[in-house]
Every structure is written in C-alpha cells, then in structure tokens.
Image (spheres, rainbow, N blue to C red):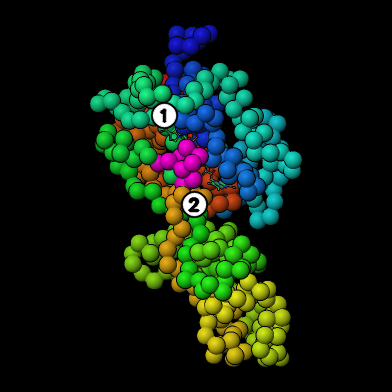
Amino acid sequence: MGEGRSPDRPCVAVIGGGPAGLMAAVVLARYVHVDLYERNRHVGRKFLVAGAGGLNITNQAEGEELLQHYAPAERLAPMLQAFTPGDLRAWLSDLGVETFTGTSGRVFPVRGTKPAQVLRILRRHAEDRGVRILTGQVFSGFTDDARPMVEQGGTAHVLEHEQVLFALGGASWSRTGSKGDWLEAFEAIGVRTLPFQSSNCGVELDLPGSLAVHAGRPLKNIALRAGPHEVRGEATITAHGIEGNAVYPLVPVLRRQLLAGEEATLHLDLKPDLALPELEGRLRDAVGAERRNAAGLDRPSWALLKAFTGKEVMDDPRSLALAMKGLRLPVQALRPIDEAISTVGGIAMDQVNEDLSLKAHPHLHLAGEMLDWDAPTGGFLLQGAFATGRWAAQGILKALGKGS
Ligand SMILES: Cc1cc2nc3c(=O)[nH]c(=O)nc-3n(C[C@H](O)[C@H](O)[C@H](O)COP(=O)(O)OP(=O)(O)OC[C@H]3O[C@@H](n4cnc5c(N)ncnc54)[C@H](O)[C@@H]3O)c2cc1C
C-alpha cells in the first residue's frame, strides 16, 4: 500500500499503459487505488507513433454507421454505445483537448495540439486522480493460481491485487513495447489465444522494377474493391505493393482469401467519377501516350496500369477504359505484422464475459487491442481501445461493488 493510501480502499492493478490502460486507470481511480504497470520508461509510446502521421483520435460516425466498422460488432456494440465518439470528444474537451472533424469523418485534436501534449494531459489526469504509474515493469507470466508476475531489473514479484486489468496492446510496431509476447502466459492458465496477424497493413504485389521510381507517390481519388467490398480513397505505391486508407478496410477480405489459399485480388478503379462510355470516348479521341492526359491520369497511375496490362490493352481504347475502371491487382501477401498499424489475434473473444473478465479467471480483465477484434484506421482503433478500457474498468468496479 502506497503513501497516503487508505487500507479500506481496494487496490486494482492495470498492466499496460496505452490508451486502453490509461482510460481504465482513470475510471477506476475514482473509487479504488490503482497501480499501473508499464514495461517502457514512459506510457503511451504507440499512441505517439499513431500521432506521428496525424493523430486520428476517433471518428464522427455514430450508431449503426459506427458499429459496421467493427468485428465482431455485436460484442463491441455495448461498449461503443456506452462510450461513443461524441462521449470521447466531450471527455477530451473536459481535459482541455479540443477536436475537429476532418475529411471522411476523421476526428483530430485541433491544429497545434501535438500528440505528446495529449498524452501528457492523459497521464497527468491519471496521476491527479491518484494512479501510481510504475514504469520499467514487465508482466512476465502467472503463478499457478493465476496471479500475474511482474519483473523489474531481473527480479519478479507477484501482484496481490484483488482485480487486475490487462491492456497489453497488439503486436505491431513491437519497438513501442506492444510485442504480443504474452500469448503463452495466457495459454498456460487455460485461456485460448489466436496467433497475431497483420491488419490495417499494406499488401504485396508483383511490381516490376519500373515502378520503383513511383514508390511513395499517391494514387489519389481511386476506388478499390475486394470481394463485395468497395472503398473510395487514396493509396500509396510502396517498394512492395500498395498501402493506404483505400487498402486497409479491404485487408480482412484479402486475409481470409489468402488463408484459404484462394486467389486474393484487388480491383482498382482509377477513374471512379467517370462512367465507362465517357472514359472510352475520351480515349478514342487520343492516340498513344496522349491517352494518359485524355483520361486525366497521373504518371504513377499510368505506370501501374502499364505494369498490370498487356500492350494490346494499352492500344485499344475500349480495353484500356475497362482496365482503368477495373485493373486486377493479384495480391501475393499482406505486409508483415511489425509494419502493420494494428493486429488481429490475441485473446479470443469467446474467452471473455460480457464485462471483459476472463471466463476462466474472473479476477482478470482485458481491454484494448490485445483482444481479438478488428476495425479499420480512421479513428476506430483508438475509439475501440478507449471504449473497451472504460467498459472493463466499469466491470471491475461492479465486481467490487463500487461506482454506479
Ligand atoms: C503507425 C501507427 C499509426 C496508427 N494510427 C492510428 C490512428 O490514426 N487512429 C487510430 O485510431 N489508431 C491508430 N493506430 C492504432 C492505435 O495506436 C492502437 O490501436 C492503440 O494504441 C491500441 O491501444 P492499446 O491501449 O490497446 O494498446 P497499446 O497502445 O499498444 O498499449 C499497450 C501498452 O502495454 C505495454 N505492454 C505490452 N506488453 C507489456 C508487458 N509484458 N508488461 C508491461 N507492459 C506491457 C506496452 O508497452 C504499451 O505501452 C496506429 C498504430 C500505429 C502503429
């Protein structure tokens, strides 16, 4: 028991100091003492990485429109309904972090607010509520009676807290501390886990060397389709294939196809705003390379088109228009986990009760990306992490007979 702590107040451990763990700690700390254990010297490293490309903290979607982005939606629904994107924005605003809605419904902290500032505010809010943040502490496994062990400087100690909340994150960008190296520990106490796989990641295509000069260049205002799903947006040519916001929502379909050994194909519409007859008409009025200008295509798009069609297609206006409206890009693989924005896998959802406690060990609770749920980028991941963190914390308070 720490200094100034009342022995009558229960003490809960939170392991993992990302958005899910910090949110849980803040909610818990209104009613109980909280010790937050984090392996790094600082909390929230992945949150900072997420912020490096523009901190897309939630999305303006609400209700069914919000839920359709999550899988399994029916499991996450109560958590996202209890803490909606609007609630998250109001909560942030109370802490002094104002947000605005950008393109495609993405919500960001107002211009000039750096991710490090947001993180500092979250950490301070937790500390002001009395959360004791203990860094350099690594969860290393369980005792025979499912008590977590934490190691610091080679010395392990057993956590005696009545209730423990894990928020260890997924397994991408392992240098942020979210290494996903705890699957075996949970398996050892009888909890079913699933191997991690990339989500929100780039895809590998068999790109010819001629496309290397276009690596890093965007394909703007395109539509991509995989199976029945179509996404409008942008993609970037990479050294290995393509990535970007038009690709990520299609990854679940491609992953399923690849795992089943089926052909995984992206269908690229380079001119989603032009109907086929109009496009064909424009191409008929031009010859050779002039057709690129006639169709209003930039060089990277033209290079990609050439790479994935034959000369006979490039020479025939009708075939060329068809190729521009539905270029087949056979996908060879997803990019590796460590490069992915998020992962699926971790603790199987059927292992947790509705309140996110483990069925096999109800004193252990889970939140955030370590659970096997999926959502695209666009703010949905952080929204999911915050909402599950809050929900799991409320489950603990209920179990302790605290809170409302
Ligand atoms: C490049 C990139 C960009 C992203 N952009 C966005 C975006 O714009 N919008 C969005 O919504 N999401 C984005 N995300 C995803 C988002 O950052 C994550 O989904 C979110 O951080 C998950 O929160 P979490 O609390 O579950 O896990 P994490 O943030 O991963 O936190 C887990 C914490 O647990 C700690 N930990 C792990 N293992 C142990 C252990 N054994 N002992 C002690 N501590 C441990 C880790 O060090 C870490 O601090 C991005 C991610 C990446 C990598």
- Tell me which residue sits at (46%, 53%) in the image: 199
Find residue 339 and name its label: 2
- Tell me which residue sits at (36%, 37%) in the image: 182
221 falls in the magenta region: no
Q: Secondary structure at mark 2?
A: helix
Q: Amino acid at mark 1?
A: Val
- Mark 2 nearby-residue class (10 Å; few <14, some 14–19, many ≥20): some
Asked whether mark 1 and ligand 1 are closer than 8 Å, the reply comes as yes
Residue 220 in picture, x, y percent from top left: 65, 66
Nearest to the observer: residue 277 or residue 121: 121
Q: Which residues are magenta?
A: 172-180
Tell whether 303 sits left or right of 391.
Answer: right
Q: Amino acid at mark 2?
A: Glu
Residue topped by disc 1? 138
- Tell me which residue sits at (69%, 48%) in the image: 101
Residue 64 in picture, x, y percent from top left: 54, 52
177 falls in the magenta region: yes
Observer able to see residue 246:
no
Separation (CA) of disc 2 from disc 1: 23 Å
Counting residues from the start of the chain, the first of labels 2 and 1 encountered is: 1
